[in-house]
Image (cartoon, grey):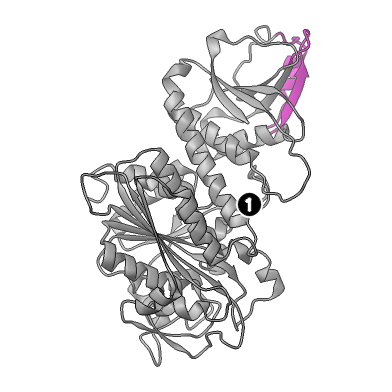
Amino acid sequence: MEIKLEELKKFKFKKGEVLVLPYFEKEKIDLKKFQIEKSFGKILRNLKEGEIESILTLDGKRIVISNCGKKENFNQRKFRIWIRKVLLNFASKNLEKIEIFLKNFPFEKSFLIKEAVCNLILADYKFSKSSEKKKGIKKINLLIENSKNFLNDLEEGKIIGEAVNFARDLSNSPAQDITPTKLAQIAKKEFKGSCFQVKILNKKEIDKLKLGGILAVSKGSSQEPKLIILKYLGTQKSKNFDIGFVGKGVTFDSGGLNIKPWEGMIDMYMDKSGAAAIFGAIRAISKLKLPLNIVGIIPAVENMPSSSSYRPGDILKIYNGKTVEVINTDAEGRLILADALSYLEKNFKPKFILDVATLTGAAIVALGQRAIALFTNKEELEEKLRKIGEKSGDYVWLLPLWEEYQEEIRGDFADLRNIGKTKYGGAITGAIFLKNFIENTPWVHLDIAPTMTSIENQGLSRGATGAGTRYLIEFAKNFLNQTFLT
């Protein structure tokens, strides 16, 4: 699908083409300009918010009018969903081209173009191994004034949309196709060039480093663990790392010996979605040429039940020396992240660390399926971090990291236990657990389990959403502002 900007003043509407026209209540549409009969005016005024009316003009042109409600109530969230649904409305039709009129929206034009392009690309995505040929629109023209001023926004929208879809491909790929070894191979294949350095640590090297969490979780699988170290060097002026990303890379999670019921296991090939978000974000950041040095750490494992699996009651020693009592082998993500976080902080010393993980079902219970659970050890940044979510489209909501919750994960025979003492507040106790493996570095934990998969009326195809990818990209852009950490 090709997306272009078209100058509104030069627009010529041809017979057989389709024009999408957003309509805001109490605003007039120039029926004469679009050659629509006056009798349609009453029909348009009776359109309810969210409804669409398709009109064939007198000279054989098709205009699709969409009621967007009241302009003062039309926010960025509504726009993202609206533009996706516009595309899906034509998804089953092999149209050569559609034109989308963008003049009337109450946003900055730069934001409007970037988000329109990004979300059209997200809506056009469908993961499928089927032999059936994909249908859809071949070309989309976005009609806007002074279009030449927004070519950079067009390109940025493409880069971000394609990066999210790259992450979705990784997340959606079944476990038979993406093992820890294959994930490491993808890193080497995709991240080539002078701005990248990729290093893969194998089981022997992981053992030598005493990464006890990664080793334990991987014990039940025939697939050996990998630690993927991905460096993006966006500036040659400094050898220091600005940001450290950590992504959960469980390529399949059966639950281990505490095996999941089949309903809970069916989509656990997506438990690598945190790793996918890191890959997607670094890919976009490199194409945007952001002058930052970023290191991404991906602990890649399979969590499987076998005679060699780690067991409830086992006591593990994590990289930073803290010990963990295993209460439940299905709380495996925090164990591999604990190793990765402490390894990252000690060896690379970034100014800021973010981890992304499908960590807990409890986050879904707390927030539903529309917001990522965000935790941070920098309370003064909470509002800025929330606004990054609003701007990126990866919406976040803050949950607490109060010291009182530490008691919930205090071990009887070790420093910590890997789940809380009660069934309540699991997203918080999971985050508190991870906090024990960060010393002094500013840190954000994104529990993306709530938004890992698409839901109805989002305008996205079934499967992975690429959750967290846009947030990391927007965070990196904000990080370039030197006042961010103050």
| Outermost residue, bottom side | 413
Examine the rendered structure and indicate whether residue 223 appears above or below residue 368.
below
**For residue 48: magenta?**
yes
In depth, the one of 112 and 302 nearer the eye is 302
Read off the magenta span.
Answer: 35-61
Query: Residue 153 lies in what quarter of the image?
Result: top left
Q: Residue at x 61, y 35 (%)?
A: 82
In the displayed structure image, the side of residue 456 where residue 485 appears, left or right: left
Position in image of residue 253 (x %, y %) = 59, 71
Position in image of residue 262 (x %, y %) = 71, 73
In the displayed structure image, the side of residue 40 where residue 328 appears, left or right: left
Position in image of residue 250 (x %, y %) = 53, 67
Position in image of residue 165 (x %, y %) = 56, 45
Classify mark 1: helix, strand or loop: loop
Residue where numbered disc 1 is placed: 454
Q: Residue at x 30, y 57 (%)?
A: 352
Q: How many numbered discs?
A: 1
In the displayed structure image, the side of residue 357 where residue 130 appears, left or right: right
Q: Residue at x 74, y 9 (%)?
A: 38
